[in-house]
Image (cartoon, rainbow, N blue to C red):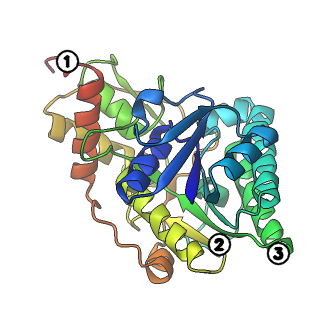
Amino acid sequence: MAVLVTGGAGYIGSHMVYALVDAGEDVVVLDDLSTGSRKNVARAATTVIGDVGDQSLVFRLLTKHRVDAVIHFAGKVVVPESVADPLGYYLANTVKSRALIATTIAASVKCFVFSSTAAVYGMPPVNPVPEDALTLPCSPYGSSKLMTEWMLRDAAHAHPLAYVALRYFNVAGADPQGRTGQSTPNATHLVKVACEAALGKRLALDVYGTDYPTPDGTCVRDYIHVSDLVAAHLDALRHLRAGGDSLTLNCGYGRGFSVMDVIETVRRVSGQNFAVRFAPRRPGDPPEIIAEASRIRATLGWQPKLADLDLIVAHALAWEKKLNGARTVAA
């Protein structure tokens, strides 16, 4: 049996592939390489360049490799971009996910792990936010992911399919062994952008909004190490293979850091006092969002091991140095 990982050449997907290979799994990666890098895929995996919406291709992969589980990362993930290009996001994240789910069912694959997002909550009135909070996304990105959750829910009622939808909070860091990390050009993830600024790859870091109702006026987020996140996917896979019920779970640590907290952490860990520019708020950014994360621990037995912002930053910096030839500049 094998696991199909869509988007397996991307940031989170490539970490997932290494974790599966490390666990002794046979892995098939499907990625169109629009944002991912083949260099980041574990050599032991079978890599196919193609579109997750290509149902003929997906069906051939599922049957040829005797796939028993799909882990679905492929899609678009930038909130402001989704506001500017909503139809592109509904195509990538909803229409193509519908095609993948249909093909998974047609191939009699019964286990599906879905990469969802805390953006489905929109601007929650209460933090930490639990899984049963109202889902009122304020961006097409969040809406496109929520619609896929709905499709999985309804498909699982009608067919022999079970799923775990993991609602990610803010993913950061890199593989502790330095095998892969965030490599997307022009990435918008705060920790990566701050690390780029610390290493002289950016003239300054832009902070979007300083007038939010938070302690220092900047947005507060729950940052989770990418390796802890993929460990949650392994736990979800074990749950489904053991015949477990479908679940929708938050994946975060349950504590928040502001944008300025992250900047100061990167400055301290890197030893570089890079420039910061303040800019207006961006559309679709909630002031604060933190996970109520007790359910995933109770249901999947998930035990994060890297829940420390300094460690997250240190791993992200190490990866950025590897990408950039360890070039640094004076403060």
Dot 3: few (<14), some (14–19), or many (≥20) neighbours within 10 Å? Answer: few
Whether residue 211 is visible, yes or no, is: no
Q: Which residue is drawn at 73% across and 38% down?
A: 92
Q: Establish if 310 lies above or below 83.
A: below
Q: In which quarter of the image is the N terminus?
A: bottom right
Distance from label 2 to label 3 (Cα)?
A: 22 Å
* Three-letter code for the amino acid on which mark 2 is drawn: Ala
Q: What element carries label 1?
A: loop
- List the residue tagged with mark 3: 157
Distance from label 3 to label 1 (Cα)?
A: 53 Å
- List the residue tagged with mark 1: 327
- Residue lying farthest bottom? 298
Q: Quadrant of the C terminus?
A: top left
Give how far across and how far down residue 215 sits, in percent: 37, 55
Give how far across and how far down residue 152 sits, in percent: 76, 63
- List the residue tagged with mark 2: 133
Q: What element carries label 3?
A: helix
